Amino acid sequence: MLPLPKSFDKNEIFLITVLFLLILIIRFLPKRFPKVITILILLEAFTIARLADHLLASAHVMGIDFYDIMDTGKYEFFGLFTYLIFAPFGYLFVYLYDWIKPRGVYLCLYIISWSLFSTCFEWIMVLFDIYKYKNWNLAYSSIVYLVVQPLTILFFEFLIREYNKMKE
């Protein structure tokens, strides 16, 4: 079992509040995708966040330890909430992409805008002591977002294409 935090403070309150708000937003959005697509999008966003943090914030993996998550730098219960908030953000990213359907330069602007938003949100998470950088900074994160978000779009397009093939 994952340990609870030593103290229940601003980072735990922030994560619970953001997760609650994101769930409300998603709950009241009109449904755009079949359930299976929605679940896979949520899982992809959760998994990418978890994998990135495991590789970049765990000294026991490849000897890399760029930042700590939450209070102790070790896995704890509320650390899971950091991954849980990435799932709804990933869903909103894909939801708006599918609704707007940006192409060409507008797709580039869409990805850059979301990367900027993601970097700003991460900065807020740093202010709330959710991330504690060691050998990392927000510029690195913005590059990661610029790579991950187009991959998320490709994954979504693949899912839709395969889903439509199955329906035929």
Image (cartoon, helix red, strand yellow):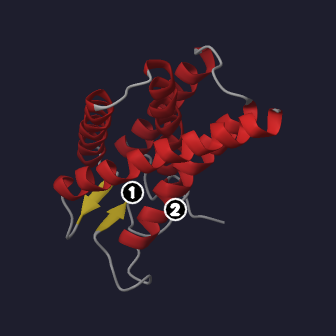
In the displayed structure, would residue 94 be above or below residue 31?
below
Contact? badges 2 and 1 (CB < 8 Å): yes
Q: In the rendered view, would you say 136 is above or below 20?
A: below
Quadrant position of the N terminus in the picture? bottom right
| Residue 27: % across, % down | 62, 20
x%, y% of residue 129?
29, 50
The answer to which quarter of the image holds residue 167 is top right
Disc ID at residue 154: none
Label 2 amino acid? Glu
Image vertical order of residue 29 relative to residue 48, above or below: above
Which of the two labelled residues, at mark 2 and mark 1, occupies the earlier sequence position? Answer: 1
> Which residue is tagged 2?
76
Q: Is residue 163 above or below residue 27?
A: below
Q: Nearer the viewer, residue 120 or 33?
A: 33
Q: Which kind of residue does numbered mark 1 sit on?
A: Met
Q: Does dot 2 land on a helix, a strand or a loop? A: loop
Q: Quadrant of the C terminus?
A: top right
Seen at 37% across and 45% down, the residue is 11
Identify residue for label 1: 70
User: Can see residue 57?
Assistant: no
Residue depicted at x 45% and y 33%: 93
At horizontal 46% and vertical 24% (from top left) the residue drawn is: 96
Is label 1 in a helix, a strand or a loop? Answer: loop
Whether residue 47 sits left or right of residue 166 in the image: it is left
Distance CA(mark 2)–CA(mark 1)? 8 Å
Residue 111 left/right relative to 99: left
